[in-house]
Structure formats: structure tokens, C-alpha cells
Image (cartoon, rainbow, N blue to C red):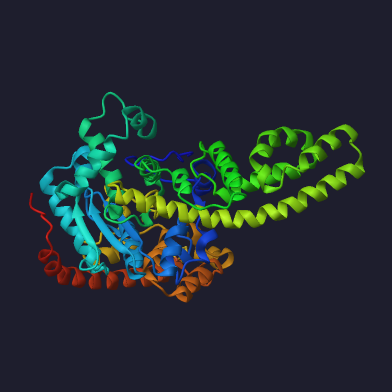
Amino acid sequence: ADDVALDPWGSSTVSDYRKLFEEFGIEEFDEVLDEVPNPHYLMRRGVIFGHRDYRPVLDAMRNGDDFAVLSGFMPTGDPHIGHKLVFDEIIWHQQQGGDAYGLIADMEAHSARGIPWDEINEHSRDYLLSLIALGFDPEEGELYRQSDNDRLQRLAFELGGKANFSEFQSIYGFDGETNVSHMQSVVTQMADILYPQLDDPKPTVIPVGPDQDPHVRFARDLATRMRFFKVTEAFASFELADAERPLVAAAHDAREEYAEDPDVPRCGEAADWLADADLDAAGVLVAESVRESAVEKLENAGMEPLRPRIRFFARQATDEAFEALIEDIEGEKRRYDQHIDAFDVGVDEAEELAREVEAHHGGYGFIPPSSIYHRFMTGLTGGKMSSSIPASHISLLDAPEEGYDKVKSATTGGRDTAEEQRELGGEADKCPVYELYAYLLTGDDDELAKEVYDECVGGERLCGGCKEQAATMMREFLEDHHEKREEAEEVLDSLDIDLET
Ligand code: SF4
């Protein structure tokens, strides 16, 4: 089924992850993997498959600068092994030095799903216990529930002032029947995403499933709208050399051209775009008209002398003249490139300055939040893993024996007969049991994960034994997790989180 539409409250499965790259501009995680110091196994194994603007977070991580991680949980049922992916992502970022936030989206659960408050309280407690049991450090990080956080609510109110109903319609498909509390829970969620930056702007990553991407995009947009101090104004306070001013202006103009683009290109790219227009051999005449306005802005930077040459070429149209022109332009481009490097630094400094000045003047100075996206786990019974179908998932509250049984009765990517399996190998890529190994059971042990995979597709592994091994590991995981949850009780009770009201 073609169910690529992203709906935060739908029962999303994603049939084709590639479409997310093409249609929604989510970038492939592979492209930044090399830049991640000590990547988590979910990153190494491609479970975390996509990101939006993750680089600023990585830069901060590598340079020892401040950054934050935040994700939320809607307490509509028990936390299960699918939620564990997000727990692990938050915890890993905390261990890399990030300020970590885990929040309970209780307002959303109540308004969008109609869950009664007493159930919400119980589930909230269970989510937080598992998060702490898996390694979240609440002394260093912050846990909160939406309804109980005044600063969050004030921020939500401010953000609501920058959003309007027609956006809710187009982003979320809200209509005349949508209840007002649901809309309030959306601005609350926008506030959640920006909350780590309330005191100090910093790169922030939101680990989520791809169905939550509309929230991320909207929050990025609102972060920008909350800025009242423009980067261009920051430039005014820079002592730019005269020769650079027009180039910066030109780069900004090009940037304006791309203002519709959700990811506005860097000034360097914008300037490249101008330079490329110069080099488009077949379109020199077109280039002239493009340059008509550019030349004016660039004249102080040494581009003006080219103008008569273009005119000359336009008249003569000889190969010789053309070669000479290209040579001139390339020479100019080299000069131009040197400037571009300087602009990039200039832009970074200007943005930094803009934020500082803004924060000083009582503004927020938000940096648009980044996100990373993980794959959904397949249900143990095939199809999607769903909180409302107990056999499809293993709850983090399941008794160890129950977890064992669920793995034993899971569907597999195995063949009809043992003979066939030995001959053709199993289909690990379609096997929920293999997913259990890769996403959870083998932990950091890449060799074991690879061994299961290779043996399966090589026909050396049969499903009966494979499931027995996985089921035993699952039982051990749950035993250990339950012990740690018990230890977490005391920690949770010592925190100032009201789980009764
Ligand atoms: Fe799945 Fe294991 Fe069977 Fe392979 S051998 S299909 S991984 S259960």
C-alpha cells in the first residue's frame, strides 16, 4: 500500500522509506554516519535511517559545545520494545554529553486519543520507570509531564500566537470537527520541541519515528518565526571590507530566491549558484541577463570588467572569443571562491551574533531543531507493531516467560520446510525475529548480529533453534529490565514529578 503520508496520530507504517527522502526532504543518515563519534548500534545498523539537519548537533558533540536531545511519549498504553528505540536514542545522546529531556505527552494522549487521566497517570509512571531503568540519568537530565510544566505552557501560548488554523488544516488535516484541546496539544508539542532552548539556544535533536516529521517541520518553521532579529541586520554590525559587502548582498539575494525552500541554502551555495550561472556555456547570453543585476552588485568585487567581454561575445560569437571569456570567468570565479569561504565564516558569526543580541533583548533566538528518524519495528505477528495488539509486540512490562512465549510464536522469514531453508536460506530481511536480534537482543555486539544474519540467509540456521535462542535472550532481557525498573522506583519517587493528578 502506498501509505507514505505522514500522520502523527494515524497508525502509520512506512512502506517505502526512499519516498521519505524524495518527497519530504528527510536526508539519509548514511551521509552523516562517518561524522558521528562512536555511533550507536541503531545508527550502525541503519535502524536510524534518516535525519533532518543533524550536523549542528554533531558539530556540538565533537567540539564539546552545548546540545540537547528531547523526545516525548504519549502514555496511551504500556511502553513496548518499539518505544525502547527512542529511550535508547535519548540515553545515548545524554551519554555523549547532551542535555537530555524525556517528556510525557499527557495532554496529547487526553485530547487526541481520549485516554482518561487515571490511565494516563499509570502509563506515565511505567514509561518513566523504563526510561530510567534503561540508563536515563534524571539527575543530569529533565523529565516532565506537559500538563504540569508552567514554563512550557507559557511558551506554547507564545507559539500559538505565531500559528493559525489554516496551517493546522494543511499540516495535520484538522477540520471543523477537531476539538480545540487537540489544537492546544499541538502548540504544546511545538513548545516541547523548543523547550530545551528556553534558557540558552543550542542545537537540539528530536529522535522520532518518521510519522512525527510534520511536528518537526512545523517546529522548525515556528523557531524561525520567533526570531525578531534578522541575520541581515547582524551583518550590518560587521566591519566588512568594502569589496565583500556587495558579494554578501548578492549572496543574500540569491538566498532570498530560495526562501521557499525549507532548507535555505548556505550563502556559499547561493554564491555558487551565481557563479555557476556565469559558467553555463550554452547560456552565456542568458547568463548576461542573470548577471545584469548581479554585475551591479558585484562591480566592486572585480566582476564589472567582464561585462564588456560578454557584450563582445554576444556580438562576435566566435569560438576564440568564447574561450577567452571562459578563461576570464574562471579566473574571476577563483577569486570569488576565496571570498565565499570568508562569507561562510561571516554568516556563522552573524547568526551567532544575531542569537546573542536577540537573547539579550528578551527574544528566544531559537536554532531550528534537528531530528533523527528510526524505522518502525515489524509486529511479531507480521504487519505493523501496534500497542493495541498485545501479540504484535513485547511490552516492557511483560513477564519474562510471556516475552519468551511471544518470541516462540512469532512469524519468521523462514521457508516452508527445513530442506528448503537449507537450500535457499531464510529471509532475514523479512523476519521479525531477526529484527529482534538487530534492534535489541544483540545490543552492541555487531558480530553476533551479523552471525545470525549470515547463518540465516546462508541456510545454516533453522527457525526453531533461532527462535529458541531469541526467546531465551528476550526472557533474560526482561528479567534484567524488571529488576532495574524496581530499582528505578525509588529514583522516580525522589523526583519532583506529580503522577497523581
Ligand atoms: Fe528469522 Fe531466524 Fe528463521 Fe532466519 S532463521 S528466518 S532470522 S527466525
- Asked whether residue 91 appears in the rendered view, the answer is yes
**What residue is shown at x 21% (from left), y 59% (from top)?**
143
Seen in the picture, residue 216 relative to 444 is either above or below; the reply is: above
Which quadrant of the figure has residue 201?
Answer: bottom left
Is 24 displayed left or right of 468 in the figure? Answer: right
Is 402 displayed left or right of 333 in the figure? Answer: left
**What residue is shown at x 35% (from left), y 27% (from top)?**
166
Which quadrant of the figure has residue 419?
Answer: bottom right
- The residue lying toward the viewer, choosing from 399 and 248, is 248
Residue 338 placed where, x, y %? 65, 57
Which quadrant of the figure has residue 493?
Answer: bottom left
Residue 345 placed where, x, y %? 53, 57
Residue 171 placed where, x, y %? 38, 34
- The residue lying toward the viewer, choosing from 111 and 255, is 255
Is 383 displayed left or right of 343 in the figure? Answer: left
> Which residue reaches farthest left?
500
Residue 111 placed where, x, y %? 20, 38
> Which residue reaches farthest top?
176
How many numbered discs, if any? 0
**What residue is shown at x 74% (from left), y 37% (from top)?**
287
- Asked whether residue 427 appears in the rendered view, the answer is no
